[in-house]
Amino acid sequence: MQTALKNLRLSFLSTALAAIFALGAGGCGEGAQPVDKKVDQVQSEMLNMGKAAKAAGGDFNKLSQADKEKFLARVQGNEAAAAQMVQQMAGAGGPRGAGAK
């Protein structure tokens, strides 16, 4: 009985390792390119949002409607969180985390 249990464990472990190896090997090469493009796209968008926040002086109400919508999309429509994000991205200070005064 113990031998059968050992064989079952070994079989499971071998299958799991093979699956991990197959998934890991699939991430190399051209398959990873779309992820890189997505990262570049997000970095570019965040850079542009930072520029807009600085141009508005950290004031959410001074943003264009298009820029407001970008910030709101990042915080699932929460306007208070979007306003705080604009402040932080502009380097305008404001409350930062628990216990901020």
Image: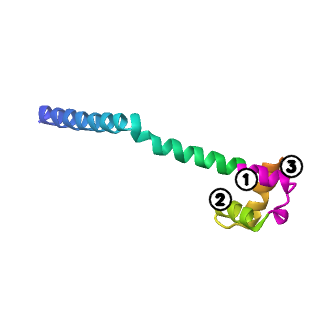
Residue sitting at 65 percent across and 47 percent down? 44
Residue sitting at 32 percent across and 33 percent down? 21
Label 3 close to label 1 by CB (< 8 Å)? no
Magenta residue check for 30: no
Inter-mark Cα distance, 1 to 2: 11 Å
Task: Determine whether, in the image, residue 82 is placed left or right of residue 29.
Answer: right
Label 1 close to label 2 by CB (< 8 Å)? yes
Residue sitting at 46 percent across and 41 percent down? 33
Nearer-N-terminus badge (1/2) = 1
Nearer-N-terminus badge (2/3) = 2
Checking the image for residue 3, the label placed there is none
**Disc 3 vs disc 1: which is toward the camera?**
1
Task: Name the residue carrying label 2.
Answer: 74
Q: Closer to the camera, 35 or 7?
A: 35
Q: Position of residue 84 (x, y in %)?
A: 78, 57
Query: Of the residues shown, which amino acid type is indicated by label 2?
Result: Arg
Checking the image for residue 93, the label placed there is 3
Q: Secondary structure at mark 2?
A: helix
In the rendered view, tell whether residue 14 sits above or below residue 85.
above
Label 2 close to label 3 by CB (< 8 Å)? no
Task: Name the residue carrying label 1.
Answer: 49
Query: Of the residues shown, which amino acid type is indicated by label 1?
Result: Met
Tell me which segment is drawn in magenta: 48-63
**Disc 2 vs disc 3: which is toward the camera?**
2
Q: Secondary structure at mark 1?
A: helix
Q: Secondary structure at mark 3?
A: loop
Inter-mark Cα distance, 3 to 1: 17 Å
Task: Determine whether, in the image, residue 81 is placed left or right of residue 9.
Answer: right
CA neighbours of label 3 inside 10 A, class few (<14), some (14 to 19), many (20+): few
